[in-house]
């Protein structure tokens, strides 16, 4: 194998080089801009992470598994996973092997960007095929075939997405179409170019037979150069279109992994970390199916993928529309192959709209909170005296009692309170009812509405209230509260559990015993409990001891939002109703007698629309307690 | 063949006549005005769906084919004769009726009696009936072109001891909301206000009408009875009420005020009925029925029956049901009488 | 139900003026006081008809019941033939009987009113009397009244009055026998007791406020400390 | 405004007013503020029209202002009223006419209450006997003095020297009529014309050639409010209500105001002065106020009385421009003279100078 | 007060003639649900913040309709957006969005 073209250059590499240069410059500038928007602290954190061996290992693993092999998609659908992995990994390997070839055979050309790409054009095979040569020929053809198979599947998916487990797929924009056309043509063209050149440069099981086939009716060599031109042009065009297309995710995704592993979070909705997320979106469209709003076709444009597309285009009106409407159920995040935290971006976007809204929570100072008593009711205006009375609330002595924090919504579903307090009593649990007569909101609804500053005041007040109780364990009925208490409150040393977890512990400790008399049921996993707090196992564990647990069409992290979510700001009641009905339909595919949930909001939302009883897990447990202690 | 005199050619009188005629009775329908249809003939569209009153009326008129009816006819005298009633009409006709049905309907409350609202005094104050007439004919000097603000006053002459009517007239709320939507269709740029005490949207589809008035038409509902209306120098109307929900007095200057006149028992009907000792009840003036639940179509006097609004405010479908019930009650009565 | 409510219903003005209120607001809509004070006669009637003694007691101690000008415009319009104005009068009556009136700034003014008006009746037989109408207390009467005050006998004579004269005519001296009869009526029908009660409660309040009777009079007559206006 | 509509209402509210033989009772406020009006009333009825209006020095206040200032109980005012009625009866009269609207309202209310609660009437009867040893009686007819002038309006018109007409233009004067609240609002049927479109003053204005102005706040109270005026710190209420009325009537450019209530002419007059002092605003022509009259004063003017005999010098808002408009001669030098032309100085002009 | 010792009082009468509807029209555009309120009071009855300080969705809507914008803001500024009112509203008004929209438009 030696150089065939003197100087190692031909004009056809120009399109490629232009594209390549453009994309390098573009990426460089983008990187600088992105770093400029990352808070200085985070920047330092990032650079430190790069030399941390543990994170370095994570980075390598994640890039291999996610960017190249697309393991997450494999888990979802084999064919779809293969489609993504074949293109990404195949292409990656083509580049790697191409470089090795160049390094081995034409080391003098090291450093020429285009050379490994068009290697076959510049070299010719001399003498007999060595084993080493055959091995590389094979590898190159193998990976090319791999990519081509992926491209073939991609074309097929465009027309029949359901075959790959996707009911709906993204509508490509213009740049997407250009890039897609290029991408689809790059590898067939490479195959053609390499096949035409296989007589000179050699080839393996794919390119050689092709060469012979073409040689039968194309005797002239004049067609060789145009195909290489075409191949180069496709590549060049692809690079030019790249920043404006979904394929920007190819360079960005790896970078995002580095940022994420460094522990960075979204601070601004469009800049810094968020920008890395935005450009990491491959527009795969998995989130479209994931979104519960899409039970109605009219809501398709409100999927996260389009949200991100509008973020890229700086279409503020659309961005606000989508971010306001989103249920924040987190399903798209849970299923996103890239792991884009679109809910976080939406929250940040809402922040830009609503964080500046003025509020007056001075009355919170007057919210008395003594273990026995309820907050003082002040019908009109707070007297200064009342405010002073609580400013000095201090931590009470530690107690063995658990603190029960029902939450606002639970006060609308009194069955939860009644049954849970009965369970407390049956199990001999001493407890303090934190908000017996209605307390202060946990602050999560404010956070969801982008009003973080307002939420901080509420959080501070509740933190003080919880700490002043002296309890070391807080039982919550509302997963919304639980999530915010875990994530935003500083309650170190205090254990925060949902009542499903608490009941599960009571059962495992034998403090209550239940009979298996609950009949058949299905469990609805509330967004904030499952995806929000990662609590999946405990409720199922409890319910299995109570009766026949039927499967739902979507379970676990794919559980569908009940429609009542406080996350959405603008979704209409009618649309919410449709989501509720969709969710109920998914729950009742196996015709359970009852629907069990573990969130007051889900309970209330489902109860209004369900054709069968909906109960909270506390109720079904309490109904079936057969012996105590 | 038995004779039945039906007094009143409005919807219930016509419907009862048609039914009785089909049962084979000789029905004589007496109507004091020159045309059949009663108040329905003066109405444009009907709540809740906005069906055209004219279409309903047409159907009714075609349904009384074969019924003898006299227009411009009044009952001159009526007196009991054994088990029958001798009815003499002012057109000279005398009937010995086996049963008499009062379907005399209602009079609209005379809005001028609520002096503080200025009906007949201020130039741009009209009643619900006037507005219906305008919807049909588009001819009323009092309705200015492109009014900026329009007000509807509920409970005019209803729920009002001073006006002598303590009861609720039942249909005015739905009518007001319907008319508010309709006038908003006519004048989309106008602001429309409804002054109400309670919104009694009791029937099927009525609450939706209310909701659409709010949502689709942006009608503003103010909970407070209008206390006083005054005309300013531009002949606009200054309306004063309390916004009771915020507990503050309120005023608004409007270009057209529509008074929702309530229902009263028909005074002409009362006069006729009085001759045979059938009288209005003291508390509301509507005819007294045999009881208040079961025998609403029967008077205390045998052979005398009621249908429609003469026994209390009613919607059109209510009146039609009563008409059919009355026909059946008369039939049952006559059969039983024959058996004795 | 409530004791205060029962007590109120003994007043003929409640018997006359309070049938079941339907909260329609016609009274408030045209009430001259509702436009300028924090005042809603409809709400007051509603509180009374709630028969809630606690609420009624608050009412009796409140400023609200003293805002009404007793023009009785409400009477004309009420579709239930209620008379919020009469209800107010009954409330004021009870507030004075129980001594609650001194709890409110406007209620305390009863002291000055009793002194001026009831005083005039007993002394002269008139509710208002020129000799006691001082220009310094009535700046709105203008420079004209200052002139009248200075030339009172001449002005009234010129205007055909019989100021302090015998026999009939405007501002005649009302014979003592008639004034005696008025006094007897006052004693017999509770007016004297009313004046005494007002004085007693007021003087207690004056002591509490650290004011002499004169200062107290001047204070309630001239001063406004609370915000009464409705914005 | 459709005149026929009003006429129809007026025809519904025609109260019976006897033609003659009245027991006349004075008004506290009017004796103090408009003594000449009462004098004119008696002069017109007795001397010009030859009617019998009897007055006794023994009658007193009815206690109405005290009652409405809530300083005397209802029973007290009722007993005082019973005493007045008893005097009427004692002097052989059965028609009772009062000069005061508050009294008129209170008499009407009292009679109604006695009618509704006979046990209360019995108690008052007993009170009256115990305190005054007088025989209880009730008037056959109760009238307000303005009812009487309304009744005689055409007789007065027949003797009139002037009409409520602008001499220069020949146009009728635009007259605002203000009815005392307690005249018809409590018992519309006891008034001429009812509560909403009272005719008692409108009838006089029409009979004497003027044109009645109907402005939006026509029915509104002048703002007296009893305790709301008698206590100095409450007077903002009183002032604000009058202000509201003037703002409402301003576009109609009224020439004059006629009232039938004792307090109203005083408030409508003096609050104009206060508003001009406070706000620098006047409501009449050429920076003047709108002159306010009692019905007797207007009757006297059309009948050709000397304006200063009618007591028009006791108004803060000057009446001279109106007199000139009608063409009534007057001697400006005589305005502030005492009895027999005695010089008693003259009041200072208000700061704004033009009232 | 000056020499008189009293002054003209401002009128508290709601005057719908002088209402500026521009902001309200904008609000209707953002959240048309504002028109659906029938003032039943469920929101106020269930209000979390209302336990401590006067907070009322229905009164705020009314205040806006009457042009008392500041009053409306003061009735909502204590809101915690907990969403109970949304759950209990019989007219299915999106109260949370309405509240933040009102606060945003009128602040």
Image (tube, helix red, strand yellow):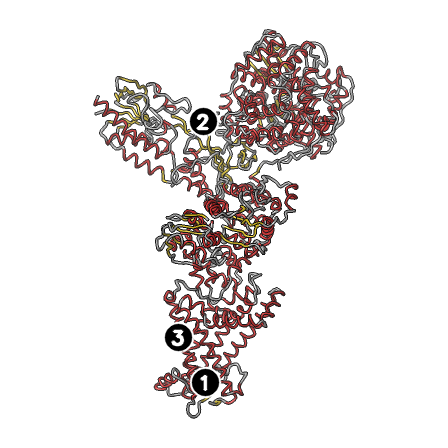
- Chain identity of mark 3: A
Task: Characterize the local packing of mark 3: few (<14), some (14-19) or many (20 or more) Cα atoms within 10 angstroms.
Answer: some
> x%, y% of residue C44?
56, 30
**Where is residue A214, by image quadrant?**
bottom left
Q: Quadrant of the N terminus of chain E?
A: top right
Gap in angstroms between the C-alphas marked 3 and 2: 86 Å
Q: Tell me whether marks 3 and 1 sit on the same chain.
A: yes
Disc 3 on helix, strand or loop?
helix
From this viewpoint, which residue is outermost toward the bottom? A127
Q: Which residue is mark 3?
A: A149
- Chain identity of mark 1: A
The reply, left or right, for residue D217 in relation to residue A64 is right
Q: Nearer the viewer, residue D8 or D86?
A: D86
- Marks 1 and 2: which is nearer the front? 1
**Where is residue A35, by image quadrant?**
bottom right
Tell me what residue is drawn at x 54 percent, y 77 percent: A21
Task: Characterize the local packing of mark 1: few (<14), some (14-19) or many (20 or more) Cα atoms within 10 angstroms.
Answer: many
Disc 1 on helix, strand or loop?
helix
* Residue C181 drawn above or below residue A244: above
**Disc 3, disc 2: CB below 8 Å?**
no
Q: Nearer the viewer, residue D296 or B10?
A: B10
Q: Which residue is mark 1?
A: A120
* Residue A145 drawn above or below residue C187: below
Gap in angstroms between the C-alphas marked 1 and 2: 102 Å
> x%, y% of residue A519?
36, 50
* Residue D242 drawn above or below residue A325: above
**Disc 3, disc 1: CB below 8 Å?**
no
Q: Which residue is mark 2?
A: B166
Disc 2 on helix, strand or loop?
loop
The reply, left or right, for residue E11 in relation to residue A79 is right
> x%, y% of residue B221?
49, 39
């Amino acid at each position: 194998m030696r150089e065939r073209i003197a100087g190692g250059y031909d004009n056809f590499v120009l399109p490629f080089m232009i594209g390549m240069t453009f994309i390098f410059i573009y990426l460089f500038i983008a990187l600088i801009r992105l770093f400029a928007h990352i808070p200085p602290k985070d920047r330092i954190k990032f650079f430190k992470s790069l030399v941390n061996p543990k994170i370095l290992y994570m980075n390598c693993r994640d890039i291999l598994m996610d960017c190249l092999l697309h393991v997450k998609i494999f888990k979802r659908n084999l064919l779809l996973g293969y489609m993504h992995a074949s293109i990404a990994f195949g292409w990656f390997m083509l580049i790697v092997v191409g470089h090795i070839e160049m390094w081995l055979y034409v080391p003098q050309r090291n450093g020429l960007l285009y050379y490994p790409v068009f290697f076959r054009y510049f070299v010719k095979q001399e003498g007999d095929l060595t084993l080493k040569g055959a091995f590389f020929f094979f590898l190159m053809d193998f990976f090319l075939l791999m990519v081509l198979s992926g491209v073939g599947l991609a074309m097929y998916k465009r027309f029949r997405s359901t075959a790959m487990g996707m009911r709906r797929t993204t509508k490509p924009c213009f740049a997407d179409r250009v890039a897609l056309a290029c991408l689809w043509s790059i590898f067939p063209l490479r195959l053609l170019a390499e096949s035409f050149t296989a007589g000179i440069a050699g080839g393996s099981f794919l390119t050689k037979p092709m060469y012979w086939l073409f040689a039968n009716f194309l005797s002239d060599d004049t067609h060789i150069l145009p195909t290489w031109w075409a191949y180069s042009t496709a590549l060049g065009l692809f690079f030019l279109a790249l920043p404006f297309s979904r394929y920007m995710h190819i360079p960005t995704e790896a970078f995002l992994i580095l940022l994420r592993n460094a522990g960075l979070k979204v601070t601004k909705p469009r800049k810094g970390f968020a920008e890395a997320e935005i450009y990491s979106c491959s527009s795969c469209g998995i989130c479209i199916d994931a979104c519960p709003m899409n039970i109605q076709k009219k809501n398709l444009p409100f999927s996260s993928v389009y949200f991100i597309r509008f973020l890229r285009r700086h279409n503020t009106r659309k961005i606000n529309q989508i971010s306001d409407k989103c249920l924040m159920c987190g399903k798209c995040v849970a299923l996103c192959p890239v792991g884009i935290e679109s809910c976080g971006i939406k929250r940040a976007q809402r922040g830009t709209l609503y964080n500046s809204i003025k509020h007056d929570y001075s009355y919170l100072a007057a919210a008395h909170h003594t273990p026995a008593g309820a907050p003082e009711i002040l019908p009109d205006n707070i007297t200064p005296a009342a405010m002073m009375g609580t400013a000095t609330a201090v931590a009470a002595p530690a107690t063995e009692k658990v603190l029960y924090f029902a939450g606002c919504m639970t006060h609308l579903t009194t069955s939860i309170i009644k049954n849970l307090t009965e369970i407390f009593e049956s199990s001999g649990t001493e407890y303090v009812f934190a908000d017996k007569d209605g307390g202060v909101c946990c602050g999560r609804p404010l956070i969801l509405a982008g009003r973080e500053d307002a939420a901080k005041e509420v959080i501070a007040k509740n933190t003080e209230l919880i700490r002043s109780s002296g309890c070391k364990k807080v039982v919550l009925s509302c997963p919304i509260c639980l999530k915010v208490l875990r994530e935003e409150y500083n309650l170190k040393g205090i254990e925060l559990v949902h009542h499903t977890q608490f009941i599960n512990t009571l059962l495992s400790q034998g403090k209550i015993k239940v009979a298996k008399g609950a009949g058949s049921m299905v469990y609805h996993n509330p967004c904030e409990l499952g995806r929000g707090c990662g609590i999946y196992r405990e409720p199922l564990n409890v319910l299995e001891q109570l009766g026949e647990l039927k499967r739902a069409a979507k379970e676990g992290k794919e559980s569908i939002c009940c429609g009542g979510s406080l996350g959405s700001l603008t979704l209409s009641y009618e649309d919410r109703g449709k989501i509720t009905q969709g969710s109920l339909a998914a729950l009742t595919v196996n015709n359970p007698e009852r629907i069990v949930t573990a969130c007051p909001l889900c309970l209330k939302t489902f109860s209004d629309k369900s054709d069968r009883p909906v109960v909270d897990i506390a109720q079904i447990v309490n109904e079936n307690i057969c012996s105590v202690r | 063949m038995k004779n039945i005199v039906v007094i009143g050619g409005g919807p219930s009188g016509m419907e009862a006549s048609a039914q009785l005629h089909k049962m084979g009775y000789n029905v004589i329908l007496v109507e004091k005005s020159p045309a059949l249809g009663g108040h329905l003939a003066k109405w444009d569209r009907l709540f809740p769906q906005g069906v055209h009153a004219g279409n309903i009326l047409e159907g009714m008129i075609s349904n009384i084919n074969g019924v003898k009816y006299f227009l411009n006819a009044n009952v001159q005298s009526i007196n009991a004769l054994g088990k029958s009633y001798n009815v003499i009409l002012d057109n000279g006709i005398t009937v010995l009726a086996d049963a008499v049905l009062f379907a005399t309907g209602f009079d609209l409350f005379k809005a001028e009696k609520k002096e503080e609202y200025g009906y007949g005094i201020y130039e741009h104050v009209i009643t619900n009936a006037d507005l219906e007439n305008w919807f049909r004919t588009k001819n009323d000097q009092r309705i200015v072109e492109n009014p900026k603000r329009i007000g509807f006053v509920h409970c005019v002459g209803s729920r009002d001891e001073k006006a002598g009517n303590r009861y609720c007239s039942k249909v005015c709320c739905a009518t007001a909301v319907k008319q508010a939507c309709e006038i908003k269709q006519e004048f989309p740029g106008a602001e429309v206000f409804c002054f109400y005490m309670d919104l009694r949207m009791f029937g099927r589809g009525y609450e939706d009408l209310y909701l659409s008035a709010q949502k689709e038409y942006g009608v503003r509902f103010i909970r407070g009875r209008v206390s006083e209306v005054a005309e300013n120098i531009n002949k606009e109307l200054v309306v004063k009420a309390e916004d009771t929900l915020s507990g503050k007095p309120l005023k608004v200057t409007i270009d057209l005020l529509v008074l929702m006149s309530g229902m009263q028992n028909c005074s002409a009907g009362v006069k006729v009925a009085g001759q045979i000792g059938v009288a209005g009840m003291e508390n509301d003036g509507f005819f007294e029925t045999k009881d208040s639940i079961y025998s609403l179509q029967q008077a205390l006097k045998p052979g005398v029956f009621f249908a429609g609004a003469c026994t209390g405010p009613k919607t059109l479908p209510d009146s039609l049901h009563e008409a059919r019930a009355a026909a059946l009650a008369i039939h049952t009565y006559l059969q039983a009488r024959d058996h004795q | 139900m409530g004791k205060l409510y029962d007590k109120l219903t003994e007043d003929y003005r409640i018997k006359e003026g309070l049938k079941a209120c339907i909260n329609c607001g016609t009274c408030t809509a045209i009430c001259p006081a509702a436009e300028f004070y924090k005042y809603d006669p409809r709400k007051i009637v509603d509180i009374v008809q709630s028969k809630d003694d606690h609420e009624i007691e608050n009412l009796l101690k409140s400023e609200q019941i003293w805002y009404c000008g007793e023009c009785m415009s409400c009477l004309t319009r009420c579709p239930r033939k209620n008379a919020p104005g009469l209800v107010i009068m009954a409330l004021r009556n009870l507030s004075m009987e129980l001594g609650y009136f001194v709890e409110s700034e406007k209620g305390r003014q009863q002291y000055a009113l009793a002194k001026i008006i009831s005083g005039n009746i007993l002394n002269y037989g008139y509710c208002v009397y020129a000799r006691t109408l001082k220009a310094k207390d009535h700046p709105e009467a203008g420079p004209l009244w200052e002139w009248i005050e200075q030339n009172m006998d001449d002005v009234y004579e010129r205007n055909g009055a019989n100021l302090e004269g015998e026999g009939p005519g405007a501002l005649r001296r009302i014979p003592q026998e008639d004034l005696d009869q008025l006094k007897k009526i006052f004693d017999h029908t509770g007016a004297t007791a009313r004046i005494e009660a007002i004085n007693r409660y007021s003087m207690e309040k004056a002591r509490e406020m650290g004011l002499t009777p004169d200062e107290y009079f001047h204070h309630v007559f001239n001063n406004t400390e609370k915000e009464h206006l409705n914005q | 405004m459709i005149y026929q509509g009003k006429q129809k209402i007026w025809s519904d509210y025609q109260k019976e007013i006897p033609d003659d033989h009245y027991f006349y009772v004075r008004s506290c406020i009017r004796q103090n503020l408009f003594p000449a009006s009462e004098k004119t009333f008696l002069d017109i009825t007795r001397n010009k029209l030859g009617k019998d209006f009897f007055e006794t020095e023994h009658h007193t206040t009815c206690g109405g202002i005290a009652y409405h200032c809530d300083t005397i109980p209802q029973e007290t005012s009722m007993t005082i009223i019973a005493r007045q009625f008893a005097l009427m009866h004692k002097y052989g009269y059965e028609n009772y006419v009062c000069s005061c609207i508050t009294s008129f309202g209170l008499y009407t209310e009292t009679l109604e209450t006695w009618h509704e609660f006979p046990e209360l009437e019995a108690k008052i009867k007993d009170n009256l006997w115990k305190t005054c040893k007088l025989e209880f009686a009730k008037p056959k007819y109760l009238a307000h003095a303005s009812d009487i002038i309304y009744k005689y309006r055409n007789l007065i018109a027949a003797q009139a020297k002037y009409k409520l007409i602008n001499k220069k233009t020949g146009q009728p004067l635009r007259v605002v009529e203000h009815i005392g609240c307690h005249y018809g609002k409590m018992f519309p049927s006891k008034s001429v014309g009812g509560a909403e479109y009272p005719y008692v003053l409108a009838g006089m204005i029409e009979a004497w050639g003027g044109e009645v102005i109907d402005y939006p706040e026509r029915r509104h109270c002048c703002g007296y409010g009893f305790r709301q005026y008698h206590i100095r710190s409450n007077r903002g209420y009183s002032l604000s209500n009058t202000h509201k009325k003037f703002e409402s009537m301003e576009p109609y450019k009224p020439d004059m105001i006629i009232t039938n209530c004792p307090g109203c002419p005083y408030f409508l007059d003096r609050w104009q002065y206060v508003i001009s002092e406070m706000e620098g605003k006047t409501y009449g022509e050429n920076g003047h106020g709108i002159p306010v009259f009692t019905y007797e004063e207007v009757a006297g003017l059309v009948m050709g009385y000397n304006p200063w005999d009618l007591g028009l010098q006791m108004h803060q808002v000057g009446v001279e421009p109106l007199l000139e408009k009608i063409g009534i001669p007057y001697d400006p030098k005589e305005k502030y003279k005492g009895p027999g032309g005695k010089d008693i100085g003259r009041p200072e002009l208000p700061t704004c100078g033009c009232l | 007060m000056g020499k008189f010792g009293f002054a003209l009082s401002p009128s508290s009468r709601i005057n719908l003639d002088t209402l500026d509807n521009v902001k309200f029209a904008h609000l209707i555009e953002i959240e048309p649900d504002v028109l659906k309120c029938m003032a039943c009071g469920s929101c106020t009855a269930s209000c979390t913040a209302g336990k401590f300080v006067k907070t009322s969705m229905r009164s705020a809507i009314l205040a806006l309709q009457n042009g008392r914008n500041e009053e409306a803001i003061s009735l909502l500024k204590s809101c915690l957006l907990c969403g109970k009112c949304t759950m209990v509203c019989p007219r299915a008004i999106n109260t949370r969005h309405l509240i933040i929209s009102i606060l945003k438009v009128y602040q």
